[in-house]
Amino acid sequence: MSQIGNYSGKMSTSTTEKPSTTARTSAAWRPDIQGLRALAVTLVVIAHVGTPGAEGGFIGVDVFFVISGYLITQLLLREVDRSGTISIAQFYVRRARRILPAATVVTIAVIAYVLLTGSQARLDQTAVDASWTSVFLANWHLAFSGADYFSVDDPSMFQHYWSLAVEEQFYIVWPLLVLFVVPRYGKRGFAIVSAVVFALSLGYSIVSTAVIPEPTYFNTAARAFELAAGSLLACVMSAPLTSRWRHVAGIGGLGILVYATFAFTELTPFPGWHAIVPVVGTALLLAAGPSTLTGRIASWAPVRYIGDISFSLYLWHWPVALAVPLAFPQLRWSVTALLIVAISIALSALSYHFIEKTFQNWRLPGLRTLWFWPASVVLVIATVLGATMLGDVRAAAQQQAAEEYFDEHGYQQVEVDNIDDVQDTLNEAVEIAESGAPVPPDIDSDTIQDAKWSDLVGGECYAGADERDADVCAFGDTSAEETIAIIGDSHAAMWIPALDIIGKDHGFKVVPFIKLACAAYPVVQDSDGRDQSECDDFRDFTNEQVAELDPDVVILGARGMLHMRDDVDGKTIDEQWASAVTEEVTQMSTIAETVVALGDVPARPDAKPNDCVDAPDASQDECLVTGESVERDSNDITQASAEAAGGFFFDTTDFVCADAGCPLFAGDTAIYADDSHLNRIWVEQVAPALGRELQDVLQ
């Protein structure tokens, strides 16, 4: 978030005319606003470190927006009142001094960090993100690239710069509006303009959030009403509230922000009308002023200091929040969170004292500092180009070293006709990995991720986001009478390529009923803000189709206990899962002679294939994981519940893990496509062994 800074209240008001009482009052320094900034950045940080119950801390950004609209309008109105005009050039000089030095340093530091520690794919994406960030268009880049602010899957290290971009775009337009309106129509006229912008933007935000929520989150037009609200307050607050109402406003405003922090979640449609809540809370705190209980707390020196460093803290905390868990994956959440906060505050303090204050006090002729803008862009782009060139050179050297290694040692011979062969292959693969063998050449994150089950199963044959049904398609021996229906999410679907081969070899038809992120079992799942009714409707569709299909076998699969909430209907997650498995197996047993519940494979959150294979000096031992994961826990519950309901359980772990561990490679084939899905090529290779094991279950 960009900050206006304390100069908004410390500017000289001397002019050829005597300043009015109102002007002097509005120009009084507001220490409580620094405290309000401290609250805003604290809310954002506690949300980003994953504080339980405080998911709504993202409203801290909305608090910043209202503060910025209030202060920038107050500043511009004073300048018009003092001189009759606005120096647009000086306005941008002040913005450059305040924003660019710290933002540019953090950008370059992040690029350097990714170059040293990240994969080539991560470096390439970071370079693209940094380029958009340098020209203050990060929000539109995120919106058009399909980013989801609340997604935990590989977020950009510059994702938080979206709000900085929104403010900079606001700063381009707002001074020009003030310059055009205020000299002609006065403060009252600009209040009307602010109210119109507020109404139009809010209306657009409500509609757009309901229709396309992910891109709307980053959309300047859907956020302008928050800045306009602060502007409107600056226009209408010609006199302070009475003492009684100041206290009411302060306590009420703080209460509203606390409520939103703990009541809002990633499932709350936002911004839309929900954003009115933090806007009102912030406006009340601004109106309350420093002479209230909340104002005195906000004006306390330690709180003010957090407000002073809040801009740097906002810039640093997000990349630190992404880096620390990668560096220390085994730490408990509480330790990780404290480490993130400590490192972020330390970096922010250094940034504030040695970068922000240095450039703010740098006495160059005003207009010359306008060169900060193009200079910062050039500096970032030069860093991007240099980093990507170094990354390419490093990748080429790594590729050559891998080729030389495998020319000398050859590839592991993969024999996977039965489960014993698979286990022998995996154990040998672990030994090869532990010896320090490099990642096979010509394998990178793109080649791994491109080999997915969806290459075989076309998009019309499964339900994606926002879809509640799909075409009924057939694989395997499509002319066979014997039929297997497979039901579930992508973790069930990833076995379809093997079932397709097995069906053709053994004479049965395979009919999938797949919806992404919806388990085969009737559980309540929260996934990226999706309406739960999507899963319910698809489950109804599946039940009707399966009853009509009348298959001989039903296979059920899902990623274990994913996106589930604790204490639904008074049950823990484990209890919900057990109940749902029992219910689904029981229901499908009335249709099919045999019902099989698939176990899930271990996830790899700390050794993601795309990061592993492209990492600097990547070797296979860094890609090893154990078989212990949440999926192991869910498998135990799935097995007990399925068998108790008269079904069968099929453990898939032995197809990816051996006693010694879970390798990423067998020969020159990647076993996983991402951190939890299997590579289609590996699934097809183990099809003969899978067929034999399934045959034992089905018989």
Image (spheres, helix red, strand yellow):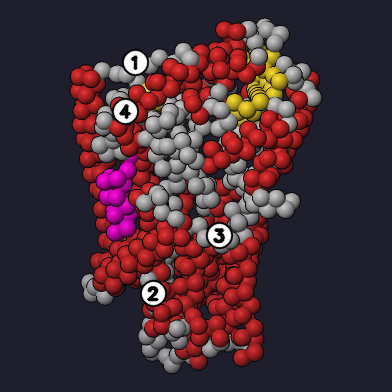
- How far apart marks 3 and 4 lie (CA) works out to 40 Å
In the depicted structure, whether residue 440 falls above or below residue 614: above
Residue 319 at what x, y percent from top left? 38, 54
Given contact means CB atoms under 8 Å apart, are the residues at marks 3 and 2 in contact? no
Label 3 and label 2: CA atoms lie apart by 27 Å
Q: How many C-alpha atoms fall within 10 Å of the one at disc 2: few (<14), some, or many (≥20)?
A: many
The residue sitting at 20% across, 23% down in the picture is: 404
Find the distance from the CA under tag 3 to the CA under tag 1: 48 Å
Residue drawn at x 76%, y 30% is 586
Quick check: can you spot residue 655?
yes
Q: Indicate the secondary structure of the residue bearing disc 4.
A: helix
**Are the residues at dot 3 and dot 1 in contact (C-beta closer than 8 Å)?**
no
Indicate which disc, 4 or 1, sits on the residue closer to the N terminus. Answer: 1
| Mark 4 and mark 1: Cα distance apart in space | 13 Å
Q: Nearer the viewer, mark 3 or mark 4?
A: 4
Q: What residue sits right under mark 3 in the picture?
A: 52
Horizontal side of 151 relative to 136 (left or right) equals: right
